[in-house]
Image (cartoon, grey):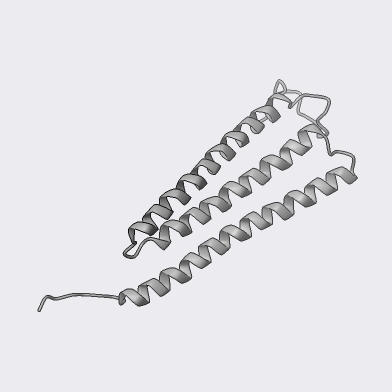
Amino acid sequence: MPLSLELLPESALRDVIGFLVRLIESAGAVVIFAGAVWAFWQFVSSGVRGRGQGAEFNRIRLRLGRFLVLGLEFQLAGDVLRTAVAPSFTEIGQLAAIAAIRTALNYFLGREIAQENAELKNAGSSPEQTRPQSRHGGGEQT
């Protein structure tokens, strides 16, 4: 009789992982929801203040994009964890498809964030910007 040290039976491990997956995916959903609420509030308040143009709008989009990327990372972590215990070939295929889609979304969101960030840095001294800029830095923002 082989000695087998099993901390949790597979069914209990599946239940624990199922709970953790729901917890992680919920965290991702909360991050995305919080980002959407924040972005909507910023959009409305900047429109009321009359600052809803150009650089301000791009700043809101940039921050929302960061929330989306973080939320998608949580969702992907949940998908990976879901296949941690004896995955079937169907589950592995589904994970591969979901991971590819979410990774592509993250890549393109990250690229757009970097592009928006560069545009904001380049527009740092434009008259469209409503925040006062420091004059000793040559118009660059860090």
Q: Please identify the residue farthest to the left as the structure is shown.
A: 1
Which image quarter: residue 137?
A: top right
The residue depicted at 70 percent of the width and 30 percent of the height is 120
Asked if residue 136 lies left or right of residue 8, the reply is right
Q: Quadrant of the C terminus?
A: top right
x, y percent for residue 2: 11, 75
The residue depicted at 42 percent of the width and 73 percent of the height is 16
x, y percent for residue 5: 21, 75
Which image quarter: residue 125?
A: top right
Question: Exactly how many numbered labels are in the figure?
Answer: 0
Which image quarter: residue 128?
A: top right
Residue 110 vs residue 92, the one in the foreground: 92
The residue depicted at 68 percent of the width and 52 percent of the height is 35
Q: Please identify the residue farthest to the front as the structure is shown.
A: 90
Asked if residue 61 lies left or right of residue 48, the reply is left
Asked if residue 137 lies left or right of residue 109, the reply is right
Q: Please identify the residue farthest to the bottom as the structure is shown.
A: 1
Residue 100 vs residue 72, the one in the foreground: 100
x, y percent for residue 8: 31, 76
The residue depicted at 52 percent of the width and 55 percent of the height is 74
Residue 110 vs residue 130, the one in the foreground: 110
Q: Please identify the residue farthest to the top as the structure is shown.
A: 138
Asked if residue 14 lies left or right of residue 56, the reply is left
x, y percent for residue 43: 80, 46
| Above or below: residue 18 compared with residue 125 | below
Q: Quadrant of the N terminus?
A: bottom left
| Above or below: residue 124 compared with residue 23 | above
